Image: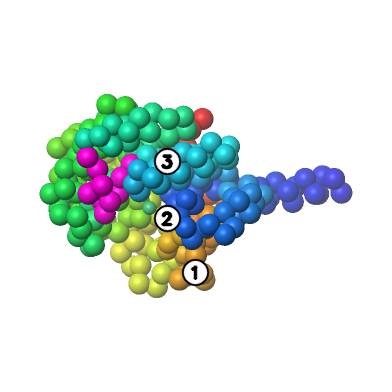
Amino acid sequence: MINLLGMLKSEVTEMIFDSHAHYDDGAFDEDREELLGKMKENGISHIVNVGANIESTRNSIALAKKYDYIYAAAGVHPSDAAELNEDNYQELCRLMDEEKVVAVGEIGLDYYWDEPDRKIQKEWFARQLSTAKEKNKPIIIHSRDAAADTLDIIKAENSWETGGVIHCFSYSVEIAREYLNKGYYIGIGGVLTFNNAKKLKEVAEYAPLEQIVLETDCPYLAPVPNRGKRNSSLNLTYVADMLAQIKGIDRAKVEEITCENAKKLYRIV
Ligand code: NI
């Protein structure tokens, strides 16, 4: 009986790594502690909480201090790039050095919202890439409707060595190949389960499983059957299921390999 219980327990103790979450978001204000308190028992072994501006970077670090299984990323999202100046950039650089900050991000270009001015987005993207290189930290890229410019800037900054992930990957197989060939990871989340995700499914099929990480981007982008609701890491099993189906392997394997991948990416031992 004890053995049987032990086996059942080990079956539910999965290792799911959420490589990109925003638990500092106001959407979690009412039940953040309760929710984060039950992650481990639900098989979520690691979460990287990602900064989108200086304040959320600070809050991400605070979460990492409070929970042993949470890590932080420090960076300013392209849509918030206008908040940066020489003074607060120094602070951001200091935050990048804090304990449990495993990456610089999310940084990049967003031409979908297209604000602030592209010149400002590009300038601070390049600047943060160069700081990540100095500090030898992997990068988390946010890139929307800006495939060519993102790649150009990464190439110009020669940011390949630090390693990185293109989070919420939304481009073609051809663009994926450029990153995969350089050892980057592809971040895949709830969108994979959407009916209209043909392009992402092609990318998921093409990319080696060893270069894919799972992510929620929560509170956004909940997978089917919870599409449209508040997302959380607890939904990652749906994404793992879909990826397992695409790869023709079982879900446990997907969870195990993507967890190892994220540990490698963020250099977590
Ligand atoms: Ni994000």
**Chain-order first, disc 3 or disc 2:** 3
Along the line of sight, the residue nearer the viewer: 36 or 86: 86
Which circle, 3 or 1, is nearer the viewer? 3
**Residue drawn at the location 28% of the way across and 37% of the way down:** 88
Badge 2 local density, few (<14 within 10 Å), some, or many (20+)? many
Name the kind of residue labelled 2 in the image.
Asp
Res 14 label: none
Name the kind of residue labelled 3 in the image.
Arg
**Chain-order first, disc 1 or disc 2:** 2
**Chain-order first, disc 3 or disc 1:** 3
Instruction: Tell me where residue 233 appears, x and y as whole percent.
Output: 53, 55
Vertical comparison of 230 with 52: above or below: below
Mark 2 lies on residue? 217
Kind of element beneath mark 3: helix
> Cβ(mark 2) to ligand 1 < 8 Å?
yes
Vertical comparison of 113 with 13: above or below: below
Seen as rendered, the residue at the extreme front is 87
Mark 3 lies on residue? 58
Mark 1 lies on residue? 229
Along the line of sight, the residue nearer the viewer: 46 or 117: 117
Q: Per the image, is 76 magenta?
A: yes
**Residue drawn at the location 47% of the way across and 58% of the way down:** 26
Instruction: Tell me where residue 10 appears, x and y as whole percent.
Output: 70, 46
Kind of element beneath mark 1: loop
Seen as rendered, the residue at the extreme bottom is 195
**Residue drawn at the location 40% of the way across and 42% of the way down:** 57
Residue 239 appears in the picture as rendered? no
Q: CA distance from mark 3 to mark 1?
A: 26 Å
The residue range painted magenta reads 75-85
Instruction: Tell me where residue 149 appears, x and y as whole percent.
Output: 15, 50
Residue 24 appears in the picture as rendered? yes
Kind of element beneath mark 2: loop
